[in-house]
Amino acid sequence: MTDHVIADYISPSDEITTEDGNISSSGLLDEVNLYNLYDDRESPEQDAERILEITYPTDTLTTIIQNTARTLHGEDEFSEGGQIIGGGYGSGKSHIELVIYHLFDSPELGQKWLDQQGIDVSLPDETRTAALQMFNLDKEYNLLSEAVADYLGIEEWEGDTRLPTVHQIRDTLEGTPTLVLLDEFERWFGMNDRSEYQEDNKAFLQNLLEAAGRDDTQLSVFLSLLYEDEDIQAVAQRTNPFTYDLSSRRDEKIDFLLHRLIGSVDDPTGVADLAKEYTDVYRQNDQIQLEDYQHFQDRIERYYPFHPVTLDLLMEKYSEQRISSDARGLLRFLTEILADNYSKVDLILTGDVDVFDYADRFQYIDNELVGKYINDYHRLQNSDESFDEFIEELTNIVLIHSLARAGEEGANKRQMLMGTMRKGINAHRIIQTFTENVYGHAWHIHRINGEYAFDVDENPAARIEKKAEDIHKHDAIHRIESLVRDDLFDSRNNVYILDPVNTEQDIPDNKALKIVVMLNAKQKYNDEFEALTTGQEREFHNTLALVTPEKRSSIDSNTGIIELARKVVAGEQLDREEEVLPEGFEEIHEQNKKNLRDRVSDKFGTVHRPTGRGLYPEDLPSGDHVDYYDATVSIIEPDYSHLKSEVEDAIEDAGAGGIQYEHLRNDFYRNTEYPTLTSDDELEDALDDLCREGTIKAGNYFEERLPNIGNDTNLVHEKYIEEDDDDDDETAEITIDTTGTTETDDGSDGDGDGESQSSTDAGETSSGGVLECPQCGRELDGNTCECGFEFDSTDVEEGRVTVEGATTEEILDEFGLDDEPSGPKTQSVPIMGTLEADNKPDMIDTLERKIGMEWDIHSATITVEGTLTADDLEHYGISADALDEKISVDETLEIEPDEPLSRQSFLSLIWDLNVPENASLDVSMQVDKNE
């Protein structure tokens, strides 16, 4: 560390130096008022030499001087005499107007100052000047024209000339350069008791500015604005005057402040060496990474004796004060800071600002937050009111960074280091001191997005914050993945995270809908979809949909979300490991989980449906109670009319031979040219409607309801169906052909001669004959067939089913339908036998297609056969990798519920069934169709 101090490099300005050589703010002229120019008593504002001496010629001031001089000379056809100076209270508007007044009112002194500053401007020998601070005029005026006339000594505008025109202003001022300065005009203009004069005052202001814009009028008009009155702004801008916004000119404020504070730089080489020394310290530390070290070194020289971060921060925070704001109030404060450190340090860092001693100044910014800081300040002190190394400085740094934005902004590690570190000081020791002795001990310091900030609320989450530092990023992302899958998408088994961390997963290639969620945002997702489908050699491409965050809203790379997830994981670990936790821990932990859910939820999102032209994005709805799964399915599910049209086109394209239902369904699940199906019901409903409308023929069904459909049901478009003109008006009937032979006990035929004969008795014929299914030709098993055909007593009684030569009563008796109870029947489903599948998703897929929406399941038998992996064995309490796939399982579950299960309940039961990874399933059921 250098042995030098600020006093070795610079001398303070005369303005802040007392007679005994100390630095004091008591002699500062930090506020000026134009009305003091006309005071009978002496005032600093009247001292032109003093005003010019403390003035720094900024670029803005230099431009204003040049434009004013050109206007008042009236020699080079320069006609921009109107100038607007804007900015908040204390931004320096009045000071600039005072300088302009003295330069042109005292041209000899003014010209000398301009020459000293190297400003190439020639002042007029004589200028008529008037500086009007509108709230402190010599008498009460209602008309701006009267006030300007009096201060300029113009009698022509008195009496009837209430509103001088542009020509009258020109003629009155002709031959004499004239300067008019108007300060605090907006507030004067807006007073209630002056409301009836507002139109006149706006009109005169416009005339005055228009006159200043003429090349035949040597008039310069200055108007300072707070930008509080839109009418005045509109009038002021109508003549397109020069406009200067002082509130945005940070560099000029810095030049102004340093000019007022520093009398001379006595050792410029030493300052340059010191700047390099600090920059070299920063270069050697990997926690301080600057974009341009040479530029920062130059800034240290320019800002000296203040560190650039310190001065920028104080300017930013001090501008938040409700009074004495901006450069005016900051000048006095910086003087006091300089006095404190002048003989103590070589460069004023942020940690050198004694916040506790200047608490009254910072309280103007945030009184409540400073009060919390004071509480923690005393809490961190030793018993003798001293502090261990760096603790006081680090606490001050965090407070200053937090001011005006409590709980939202704070100091990061780089700012802490640059606020305390000098040559010879170990950066690691500084950060270690903060994490071990400040954070967690100061009750009101919170961590937000990698920064540390004071907040008015106490922080019982310090334990969580510390624990979170040890949580790996992948564990945090894994927690986010769990939240997305289990919370946002309600733990649905067909929801997957794309490329999850800490997890191996296999997205099955089956006909069930699968929602794949991504945590990172990209411009396009076609590559990801292709990698999922073609890249993995999938068959059913049209069963996948991507859900992603909104544009530029990645989750897995969002620092804030990952840090929040770390805290959630840390809280969960502490909850498991610790017996005693701080008061309020549970509330904060639950809030962290809610915040994480909200932050992640806010990032979603977009659903990308596969189409023949690539993925088509659609926005997910937003809101606190959105069910993301239902919302996603609602977006994916096809428009019904569009689906019908696509189904019809596909059947028509199949030609006269038609297409089997199984192949049509598979085509929809494979080909992204088709709408994405969320269930087989959508396809079956479309086929049912098309069949009723006579658009297609399904098996033997045409222009009627399609009660059942099997995999081999053939679908033919109406254009290929030959019409039978003779049967157009007849009711379609199903006739069961019972033609066959019967034999007597002795082997002869019925009449004893061995000849066969046809029988007309349904019972006798059916006993010896063959009852063929009219739909597929197979032998009937009772009143049902394997293809799905079945009939009941209603079909017989209404004539839809007949048997050749048999009466209705005979048919009912033969098939046991005369005693058939009315209402629903319980039957074995499916009719073709037990359902089989190689894995659980395929079984779910099959069941969803085969079980009707209104069916009730009375009993079921589930058989599971397969070999057990090491992961499966753990379910049975066996932890032995050597037995991987060496053990087989054959389990049968008999389900006999007290109350029948609904379709959805049974499907959920299968979903929740623990099935080994390598296993096949058989399912048979007894159901009530409720038809």
Image: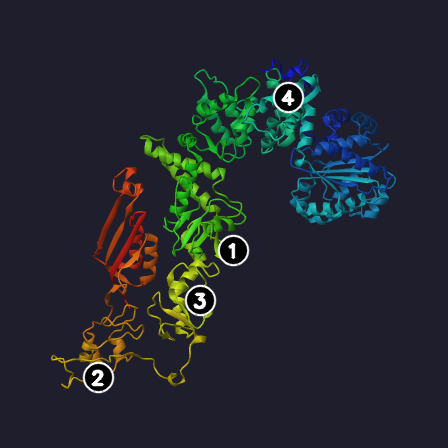
Distance of label 3 from label 1 (alpha carbons): 21 Å
Residue at mark 2: 758
Distance of label 3 from label 2 (alpha carbons): 46 Å
Distance of label 1 from label 4 (alpha carbons): 57 Å
Decide: few, some or many residues near mark 4? Use Cα within 10 Å; few <14, some 14-19, many ≥20. some
Quarter the C terminus occupies: bottom left
* SS under mark 2: loop
> Reading the chain from its start, which is encountered first: label 4 or label 3?
4
Q: Is residue 833 left or right of residue 390?
A: left
* SS under mark 3: helix
Q: Position of residue 234 (x, y in %)?
A: 70, 47
Rendered image quadrant of residue 905 = bottom left
Residue at mark 3: 647
Quarter the N terminus occupies: top right
> Reading the chain from its start, which is encountered first: label 1 or label 4?
4
Front: mark 4 or 2:
2
Q: What label sits on residue 276 in the rendered view?
A: 4
Res. 644 visible in picture = yes
Q: Nearer the viewer, residue 584 or 373?
A: 584
Q: Nearer the viewer, residue 920 or 443?
A: 920
Q: Is residue 904 left or right of residue 752?
A: right
Disc 1 marks a residue whose amino acid type is Gly
> Reading the chain from its start, which is encountered first: label 3 or label 1?
1
Residue positioned most to the left:
746
